Image (cartoon, helix red, strand yellow):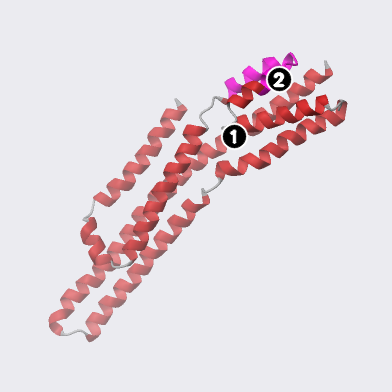
């Protein structure tokens, strides 16, 4: 239910991005906006590509019911069937939590085989999970900061185009021939308004998409933290029994 809602929200944001640009004559906007429109369009293309990549990473590749995954492992851990738990984790090691659990349990199993016991084995277990987490978790949120940069730069480029457009309009009033003043003034104002509108039309959907992807990334990280602790505790309890 929650995943379907997130997918619907993501598609709605992309639809808003397209419709916000379709509400105006893009060809005319490009003609009047000058070179700034190409820079903003480049940022739009980069944003769409990045959004598709992160969507695939966070919703397709990380598609795993963490609670069911943990409950499945819990039974094997409780019965000291570590090898079977590792085998299950290996099937999901392309996901972040699967990779962390796989490495953590492998480290624990190596510690048992090397003769570690008690506090030493517990520390080895904790270090194995921490090391795997430090290796994998940064990839979950990796690249999301680019959405902020794209949103800010596209807005600033729009404002810069506005300034150039107004400068063009004022120069037309001051220096152009009387017959050309009206045309040049219209072109300058059109450039000023067009670049601002286009920059914001890229920035707003970019910020919304980033927020949706960030929410998904935060949930993945929170699930990793929660169920890693539960798994470590479960293994510790099994060691004491």
Mark positioned earlier in the residue sequence (1 or 2): 2
Against 165, residue 240 (above or below) is above
Of all residues shown, which one is farthest toward the left? 179
Front position in the image: 118 or 154: 118
* Residue 212 in the image, given as x and y percentages of width and height: 46, 41
Relative to 204, 182 lies left or right: left
Res 118 quadrant in image: top right
Label 2 neighbour load within 10 Å: few <14, some 14-19, many 20+: some
- Specify whether residue 57 is painted magenta: no
Indicate the secondary structure of the residue bearing disc 1: helix
Label disc, if present, on residue 86 of the rendered structure? none
* Residue 167 in the image, given as x and y percentages of width and height: 31, 77
Q: What stretch is highlighted in magenta?
A: 67-86
Q: Which residue is drawn at 76% across and 33% down?
A: 126
For the stretch drawn in magenta, the main secondary structure is helix
- Specify whether residue 73 is painted magenta: yes
Query: Number of callouts in the render?
Result: 2
Report how far apart the C-alphas of labels 1 and 2 lie in the structure: 20 Å
Indicate the secondary structure of the residue bearing disc 2: helix
Label disc, if present, on residue 96 of the rendered structure? 1
Report the quarter where the N terminus lies: top left
Of labels 1 and 2, the one closer to you: 2
* Residue 68 in the image, given as x and y percentages of width and height: 58, 20
Report the quarter where the C terminus lies: top right
Label 1 neighbour load within 10 Å: few <14, some 14-19, many 20+: many
Q: Which residue is drawn at 61% across and 29% down?
A: 98
* Residue 141 in the image, given as x and y percentages of width and height: 56, 44
Q: Residue at x 61, y 44 (%)?
A: 138
Q: Residue at x 75, y 22 (%)?
A: 235
Q: Mark 2 points at which residue?
A: 83
Front position in the image: 14 or 102: 102
Tag 1–tag 2 contact (CB < 8 Å): no
């Amino acid at each position: 239910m929650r995943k379907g809602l997130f997918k619907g929200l993501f598609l709605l944001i992309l639809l808003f991005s397209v419709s916000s640009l379709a509400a105006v004559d893009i060809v005319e906007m490009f003609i009047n906006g000058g070179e700034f429109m190409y820079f903003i369009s480049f940022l739009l293309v980069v944003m769409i590509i990045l959004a598709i990549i992160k969507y695939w990473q966070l919703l397709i590749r990380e598609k795993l019911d963490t609670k069911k995954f943990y409950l499945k492992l819990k039974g094997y851990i409780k019965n000291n069937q570590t090898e079977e738990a590792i085998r299950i984790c290996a099937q999901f090691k392309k996901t972040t939590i699967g990779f962390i659990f796989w490495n953590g349990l492998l480290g624990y199993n190596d510690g048992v085989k090397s003769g570690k016991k008690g506090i030493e084995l517990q520390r080895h277990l904790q270090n194995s999970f921490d090391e795997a987490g430090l290796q994998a978790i940064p990839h979950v949120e990796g690249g999301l900061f680019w959405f902020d940069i794209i949103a800010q730069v596209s807005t600033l480029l729009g404002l810069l185009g506005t300034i150039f457009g107004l400068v063009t309009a004022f120069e037309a009033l001051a220096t152009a021939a009387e017959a050309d003043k009206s045309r040049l003034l219209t072109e300058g104002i059109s450039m000023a308004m067009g670049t601002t509108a286009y920059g914001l039309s890229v920035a707003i959907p970019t910020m919304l998409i980033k927020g949706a992807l960030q929410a998904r990334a935060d949930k993945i990280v929170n699930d990793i933290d929660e169920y890693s602790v539960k798994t470590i505790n479960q293994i510790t309890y099994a060691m004491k029994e």
